[in-house]
Image (cartoon, rainbow, N blue to C red):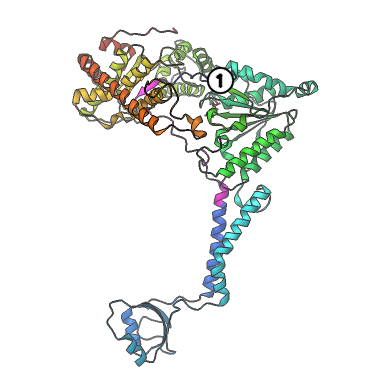
């Protein structure tokens, strides 16, 4: 499906309260790797600095020892000192010839010392009495004219050198000049397609058939460019694959190349960005040149949003100019295609909404293909692909696994299959069984178990916290069924309650969203109702609540007072610098608080009304640690409200 209109919301991840660890947040784009060139520059400056130091020390021979003021005083009294330089209280001096080895430890002829400010001596008189030549100022030894010149000019020379250096890089695009010194990376290498080698095809991609279909004419063109050329037909130059992480965008691009049997060049946009302006652009140039040499071919650029985000938006580090130059170079290269050259650029992003409109203009990435997480059938097919090489026990039902994994992406499913296989190996089995799969699923969904000995008191409180989530989830009409409750610490969480929908969900009602807020507040409410106190254990819950309520009030028009508009920016608007008026922000704040307060009150009230069931659940959790769906509903005495829509 080519999406001109905003895409429907894709099915959401199963939600969990006290969520197990999410993927670690990616660092802000733009600066995601330490640019090699920058290090080179630092190294160069260091070398220059060292040389300067060497030159200096050459002119500044001999380090005088520092002696105590007492000794100095004595030397003066003994008439050993011939002359001194003084600046403030710092004194440098020289001994008379032949008097250089006065008593014991010293073999110095020159020295320095510091006169204590409180020294209440008659230094001047002593000096004159003993015939010492006194010179005030330059404490620093007189240097030759040349050395002085060098020192004063050194920073200037350094600056100019750096400037010339950067300018050269810019002009030569990093190809000539001192390029080698900066450890420039080799241009991206194509993935060779040797006859014997197994190549990725559409067979390896499942669950996104309509997307593969959309790309089939690209394959057609690549495998037979002459036919298109004769007809004078123009192919799209760029196709943008847009979708959440792990949905198989890279896999698809590879499959297109594999199907057509053409070379595949892949690069991640963040690799282009260097601190030094011009390097990214030159890398782009090289990449396209390579691809043209062996055309027809495919260039795949991952994370295109790193360089392709709309201008004027909040710029990340990594240099605005560099990003813009790299982007411009890509656009220029794409404009440069005559369309029949046979180089097609596929790019991937999970943030199509923030892309610079220049990228999606006709003749560039004018075809946007959105890749969504797979539906139930798709999940089953993906599981089948990733268990092709895994011996499955007869009790394994992939359709059933697919039913219990709404929202999971291809990458997550691949991971699930692998985890199950690992478990089977660990247990010394010949085949992967149903129970391996369900345990692997638990691990993937809830996070890995942690062996953590919890004080009894805290275990109890956790049991009530999770029971609060679970009971409210079960009581809420239309809420996602509770699948699992556990007080075994997992990931960063002390306990987890997992709810997943029966069927894939695409849009949400206000009632459902309120239900989710109430459920998410259930943990805190239970602690409040049972212990009359709250703990820090609800941080993650509150984050979820905030995200949902912000959406309801400021983006989905569910508050009368704020009105039917997207008042708070989504990223697209942020990129264009739109933001709400102060009064609107006030109203949003007020409304968000109101909704959350209402939900919290309702959560507490419901838990008080159903205190018996709450106690039963908590007790069962303390005894069993983990409850599955059937147990949970039975113990709470709640009838399952939703029907299994898909199975
Ligand atoms: N539709 C699918 N069919 C089969 N396998 C899939 C599918 N989607 C993902 N996978 C599996 O997940 C892996 C990771 O997917 P891939 O790297 O292509 O995702 P992506 O969308 O490019 O992710 P990202 O945005 O993080 O780069 C693939 O190598 C493949 O094993
Ligand atoms: Zn919680």
First to last magenta residue range: 14-39
Residue 401 in picture, x, y percent from top left: 45, 14
Residue 285 in picture, x, y percent from top left: 68, 40
Q: Quadrant of the C terminus?
A: top left
Residue at figure coordinates x 58%, y 29% from the top left: 348
Residue at figure coordinates x 61%, y 53% from the top left: 166
Relative height, residue 400 to residue 180 (above, below): above
Relative height, residue 232 to residue 284 (above, below): above
The answer to whether residue 18 is seen in the rendering is no
Q: Picture quarter containing residue 201?
A: top right
Residue at figure coordinates x 64%, y 50% from the top left: 169
Residue for badge 1: 5
Q: Foreground: 80 or 4?
A: 4
Label 1: how many residues lie within 10 Å, few (<14), some (14-19) or many (20+)? few
Relative height, residue 1 to residue 77 (above, below): above
The answer to whether residue 392 is seen in the rendering is yes
Relative height, residue 153 to residue 319 (above, below): below
Give the farthest residue toward the right: 230
Q: Foreground: 378 or 429?
A: 378
């Amino acid at each position: 499906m080519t999406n001109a209109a905003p895409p429907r919301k894709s099915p959401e991840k199963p939600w969990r309260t006290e969520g197990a660890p999410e993927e670690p947040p990616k660092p802000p784009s733009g600066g995601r790797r330490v640019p090699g060139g920058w290090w080179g520059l630092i190294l160069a400056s260091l070398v220059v600095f060292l040389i300067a130091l060497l030159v200096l020390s050459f002119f500044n021979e001999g380090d005088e020892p520092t002696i105590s003021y007492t000794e100095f005083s004595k030397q003066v009294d003994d008439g050993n000192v011939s002359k001194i330089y003084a600046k403030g209280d710092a004194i440098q001096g020289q001994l008379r010839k032949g008097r250089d080895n006065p008593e014991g430890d010293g073999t110095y002829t020159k020295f320095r010392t510091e006169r204590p400010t409180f020294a209440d001596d008659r230094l001047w008189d002593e000096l004159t009495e003993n015939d010492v030549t006194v010179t005030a100022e330059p404490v620093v030894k007189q240097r030759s004219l040349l050395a002085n010149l060098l020192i004063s000019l050194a920073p200037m020379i350094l600056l100019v050198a750096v400037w010339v250096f950067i300018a050269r890089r810019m002009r030569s695009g990093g190809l000539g000049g001192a390029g080698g010194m900066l450890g420039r990376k080799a241009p991206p290498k194509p993935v060779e397609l040797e006859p014997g080698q197994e190549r990725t095809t559409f067979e390896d991609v499942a669950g996104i058939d309509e997307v593969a279909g959309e790309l089939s004419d690209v394959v057609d063109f690549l495998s037979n460019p002459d036919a298109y050329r004769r007809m004078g037909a123009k192919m799209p130059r760029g196709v943008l694959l847009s979708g959440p992480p792990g949905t198989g965008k890279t896999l698809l691009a590879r499959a297109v190349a594999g199907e057509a049997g053409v070379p595949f060049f892949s690069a991640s946009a963040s690799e282009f960005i260097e601190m030094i302006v011009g390097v990214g652009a030159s890398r782009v140039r090289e990449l396209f040149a390579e691809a043209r040499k062996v055309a027809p071919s495919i260039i795949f650029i991952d994370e295109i949003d790193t360089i392709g985000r709309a201008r004027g938006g909040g710029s990340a580090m990594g240099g605005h100019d560099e990003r813009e130059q790299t982007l411009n170079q890509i656009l220029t290269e794409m404009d440069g295609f005559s369309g029949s050259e046979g180089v097609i650029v596929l790019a991937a992003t999970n943030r199509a909404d923030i892309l610079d409109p220049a990228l999606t203009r006709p003749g560039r990435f004018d075809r946007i293909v959105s890749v969504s997480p797979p539906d139930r059938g798709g999940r089953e097919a993906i599981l089948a692909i990733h268990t092709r090489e895994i011996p499955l026990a007869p009790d394994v039902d992939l359709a059933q696994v697919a039913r219990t994994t709404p929202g999971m992406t291809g990458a997550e499913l691949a991971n699930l299959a692998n985890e199950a296989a690992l478990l089977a190996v660990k247990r010394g089995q010949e085949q992967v069984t149903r129970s391996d799969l369900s345990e692997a699923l638990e691990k993937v969904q809830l996070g890995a178990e942690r062996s953590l000995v919890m004080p009894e008191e805290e275990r109890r409180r956790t049991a009530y916290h999770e029971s609060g989530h679970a009971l409210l989830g079960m009581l809420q009409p239309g809420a996602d069924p509770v699948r699992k409750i556990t007080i075994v610490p997992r990931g960063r969480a002390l306990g987890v309650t997992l709810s997943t929908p029966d069927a894939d969900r695409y849009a949400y009602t206000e009632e459902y969203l309120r239900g989710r807020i109430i459920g998410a507040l259930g943990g805190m409410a239970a602690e409040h109702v049972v212990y009359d106190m709250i703990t820090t254990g609800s941080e993650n819950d509150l984050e979820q609540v905030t995200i949902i309520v912000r959406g309801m009030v400021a983006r989905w028009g569910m508050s009368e007072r704020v009105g039917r508009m997207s008042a708070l920016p989504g990223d697209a608007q942020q990129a264009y610098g739109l933001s709400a008026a102060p009064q609107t922000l006030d109203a949003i704040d007020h409304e968000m608080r109101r909704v959350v307060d209402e939900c919290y009150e309702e959560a507490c009230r419901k838990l008080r009304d159903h205190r018996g069931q709450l106690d039963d659940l908590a007790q069962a959790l303390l005894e069993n640690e983990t409850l599955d769906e059937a147990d949970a509903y039975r113990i709470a005495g709640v009838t399952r409200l939703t029907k299994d829509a898909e199975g």
